[in-house]
Image (cartoon, rainbow, N blue to C red):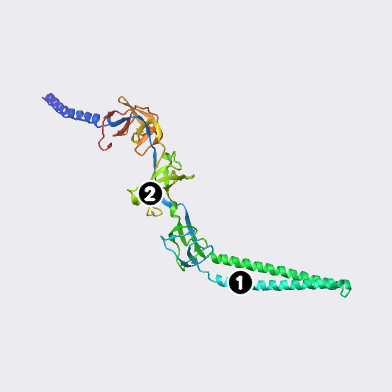
Amino acid sequence: MRFFAINRRTLLLLAVLAPLLLLLGYVALRTGPLAAVPVTVTRVENRSIRPALFGIGTVQARYTYSIGPTVSGRVLRVNVHVGDTVKAGQVLGAMDPVDLDQRIQAQQAAIGSAEAQLRQALTQRDFAGSQLARYARLLPTHVISEEVVATRRQDLQVAEDGERAARNALRGARATLAALEAQRGNLDLIAPAHGLITARDADPGTTVVAGAPVIEMIDPNSFWIDTRFDQLSATGLAAAQPASIVLRSRANQPYAGEVLRVDPLADSVTEETLAKIRFKHLPQPLPPIGELADVTVTLPTLPARPTVPNASLQRVDGKLGVWRVITDKLAFVPVKVLGSDLDGQIQVDGPKAGDRVVVYSQRTLGARSHISVVERIPGVSP
């Protein structure tokens, strides 16, 4: 009876464990680590693509002007406000001359005095010259001595030296007046070109140092987009290529543009290439300086080469490549990217036209992974 009870207990235990083992085996083979990984595949095609670069930039002006005094002083007046349009040569404001006008008047008086001294020196020179000539005519008659003629010759030399000194003094006084008048003229803040006022950095009564801007202006016809592109995809970027500009404030209104130039210096920190994109026709009203813009540059069409979706590219052990499907096995094929477009198509060197490659997979793949080709992976592929 005891042996029968033990066997009965064992049979009951086996009856319970057997379904559990079968269930665990089923789960391991269908959804566990031994299960086949669902994947979607596509065939490599030989096709040409139209590469394009996408970058983000800011609206800037090519020509900007900072207008301020050449010497430290106090702002007397500012005639313009932000947003005003000005013409070349227009007076935008002025600095306080303080005592400069009085110094100019004093220097003008000093010039008058120097001119009077020059006239006096000329008179003395002419008189000394006439005296020397008269005494020189009398010398042969022995009415006067040689010493008297020598004295008159010395008087003429002194008068000529006085004339030169008076001329130099007059020349110096006039140069000083010209410098003061130039300094007085520099107190006016003049627009160097036609432009748009973008900032008033000082108001009347403010004291500013030499070189500090009082007014800032830009040339509205020189607007461009200072754009950054990823260096990895910027191959082929060059001047004169067509571009599309979408301002953030006008998302549904693209503007035609073109690459004006590619800067020779790149950003080594962000690994971006810098380029200037200009509008073919300026938008109206003008966008504010500093507004963000999305820029798409169209590159020349590439000839037909093996092309795969960018989703099929994977990085394994530091190498970029694709998983090639051979029957029901996988082989990793390293690739070299030759070009890409904004539709997600990438030309590669590695796989051949007609090869089947994995696009999406439910889990990370390996060389020994078992796969199951499906049309769609829920939650992964569209």
Q: Which residue is labeled 2 in the image? A: 293
Nearer to me, 116 or 228: 116
Q: Amino acid at mark 1?
A: Gln
Q: Is residue 189 left or right of residue 133?
A: left
**Quadrant in which the C terminus is drawn:** top left
Q: Residue at x 76, y 73 (%)?
A: 127
Q: Quadrant of residue 139?
A: bottom right
Q: Nearer the viewer, mark 2 or mark 1?
A: 1
Q: Secondary structure at mark 1?
A: helix
**Quadrant in which the N terminus is drawn:** top left
Label 2 Cα crowd, 10 Å radius (few <14 / some 14-19 / many 20+): many
Q: Is residue 315 visible to us here?
A: no
Up-down: is 353 above or below 113? Answer: above
Q: Quadrant of residue 125?
A: bottom right
Q: Residue at x 61, y 71 (%)?
A: 108
N-term mark: 2 or 1: 1
**Number of labelled discs?**
2
Farthest bottom residue in view = 143
> Residue 311: image x %, image y %?
33, 35
Q: Secondary structure at mark 2?
A: strand
Q: Which residue is labeled 1 in the image? A: 108
Nearer to me, 346 or 48: 48
Up-down: is 51 above or below 104? Answer: above
